[in-house]
Image: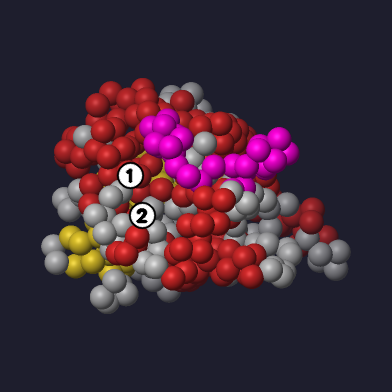
């Protein structure tokens, strides 16, 4: 049985399991308990980060990164990011190059606050009723309704012929792209979808640019396709949200921490047209990740079973910091809510969830996966 197949608690094994087998399972699980118990003083844990996209919900990832940066036991190797995840990764790298952990935290805070400043002038705002009721959704906003209806009959090429994008101005103001590209010591892999071929394009440090970041976040019903070297790109979420393979191929670090924003599971069946569309979008933007996790699980099993050369193939240990129930329950329209209060609320949730994850799982880094890949993704 591989690490992804072991039950976390042998006491929860089926009742018909013989006592001697149960005892053996408990003994096998003991190293796992010890691994989670404590991390020796002075020990550092190196990780790769895979950051999902999700619009304003990317502020949850801001909170996660902010909390991880507080813990000097954690070191950072590489980032794979898509859409808001790509922006968080680039801002992190530029800040890190400028002033280490403090620089990364400062730049992330500045970036998201500037998003809020720009968003304050948007026609999409919460209604008074939603504000009073504590709802973060904006689908009842007249501005949201108007833009949604307009987007069904007109393209960004018609509604925005000058191709204005306020995200470009914010990124240009906050991020020194050369610092992120050359001086951070952090490997970056930003995902976008080639409009012509439908294939994923991964922009690394050498090909990094503001256009590459914008391409990763280019939702085709909101923005014109981003042109880079004669090719056009849409949001990377269609083909990699985020992509795991660049981390497996290009990093000596074997631990990947996935920051998951889009819910994998919803118990309810959507009934309205909007609910159905929202769930289809969630499934679409998780599909490539699900396929990659299946491949990771398959290769890990072959290595563990001695069927692949461990010198040529290496185990990829998977960890996941997942948005909690409060974020999952938020209406999909809140991904377009740029309100400062909302972004800071998401940041605080991210900090709390990351703190809980560190306390429970940091000792697993470098030892074993802390998430059951088969149960979670297959």
Instruction: Classify the position of the C terminus by image quarter.
Output: bottom right
Residue carrying label 2: 217
Relative to 349, 104 lies left or right:
left
Residue depicted at 52% across the width and 36% down the height: 339
Mark 2 or mark 1, which has the lower sequence index? 1
Whole-percent x and y of residue 210?
A: 23, 47
Which mark, by number, is residue 167? 1
Q: Residues within 10 Å of mark 2 (few under 14, many from 20)?
A: many
Tell me if residue 80 is in the magenta stretch.
no
Relative to 377, 207 lies left or right:
left
Q: Is residue 64 visible?
A: no
Secondary structure under tag 1 reads: helix
Q: Are marks 2 and 1 in contact (CB under 8 Å)?
A: yes
The residue segment tinted magenta is 112-138
Tell me if residue 120 is in the magenta stretch.
yes
Residue depicted at 81% across the width and 64% down the height: 14
Q: Nearer the viewer, residue 210 or 121?
A: 121
**Foreground disc of the pair 2, 1:** 1
As displayed, is residue 51 above or below residue 229?
above
| Name of the residue lying farthest toward the right | 15
Whole-percent x and y of residue 356?
A: 61, 35
Relative to 363, 224 lies left or right:
left
As displayed, is residue 4 above or below residue 299?
above
């Amino acid at each position: 049985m591989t690490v992804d197949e072991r039950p976390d608690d042998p006491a929860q094994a089926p009742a018909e399991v013989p006592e001697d087998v149960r005892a053996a399972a408990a003994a096998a699980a003991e190293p796992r308990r010890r691994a989670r118990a404590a991390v020796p003083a002075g020990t550092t844990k190196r990780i790769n980060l895979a950051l999902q996209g999700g619009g304003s919900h990317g502020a949850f990832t801001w909170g996660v990164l902010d909390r991880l940066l507080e813990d000097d036991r954690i070191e950072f190797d590489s980032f794979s990011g898509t859409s808001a995840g790509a922006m968080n990764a680039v801002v992190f790298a530029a800040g890190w190059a400028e002033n280490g952990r403090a620089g990364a935290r400062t730049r992330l805070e500045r970036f998201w606050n500037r998003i809020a400043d720009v968003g304050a002038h948007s026609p999409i705002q919460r209604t008074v009723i939603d504000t009073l009721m504590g709802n973060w959704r904006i689908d009842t906003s007249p501005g949201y309704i108007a833009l949604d209806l307009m987007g069904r009959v007109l393209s960004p090429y018609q509604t925005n012929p000058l191709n204005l994008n306020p995200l470009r101005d914010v990124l240009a103001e906050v991020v020194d792209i050369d610092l992120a590209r050359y001086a951070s010591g952090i490997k970056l892999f930003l995902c976008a979808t080639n409009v012509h071929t439908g294939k994923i394009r991964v922009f690394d440090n050498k090909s990094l640019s503001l256009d590459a970041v914008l391409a990763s976040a280019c939702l085709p019903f909101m923005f014109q396709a981003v042109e880079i070297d004669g090719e056009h790109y849409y949001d990377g979420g269609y083909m990699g949200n985020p992509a795991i393979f660049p981390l497996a191929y290009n990093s000596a670090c074997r631990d990947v921490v996935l920051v998951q924003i889009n819910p994998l599971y919803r118990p309810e069946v959507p009934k309205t047209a909007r609910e159905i569309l929202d769930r289809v979008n969630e499934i679409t933007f998780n599909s490539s990740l699900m396929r990659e996790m299946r491949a990771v699980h398959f290769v890990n099993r072959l290595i563990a079973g001695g069927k692949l050369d461990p010198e040529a193939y290496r185990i990829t240990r998977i960890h996941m910091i997942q948005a909690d129930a409060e974020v999952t329950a938020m209406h999909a329209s809140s991904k377009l809510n740029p309100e400062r209060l909302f972004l800071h609320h998401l940041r605080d949730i991210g900090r709390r969830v990351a703190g809980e994850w560190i306390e429970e799982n940091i000792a697993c880094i470098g030892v074993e996966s802390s998430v059951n890949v088969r149960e979670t993704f297959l």
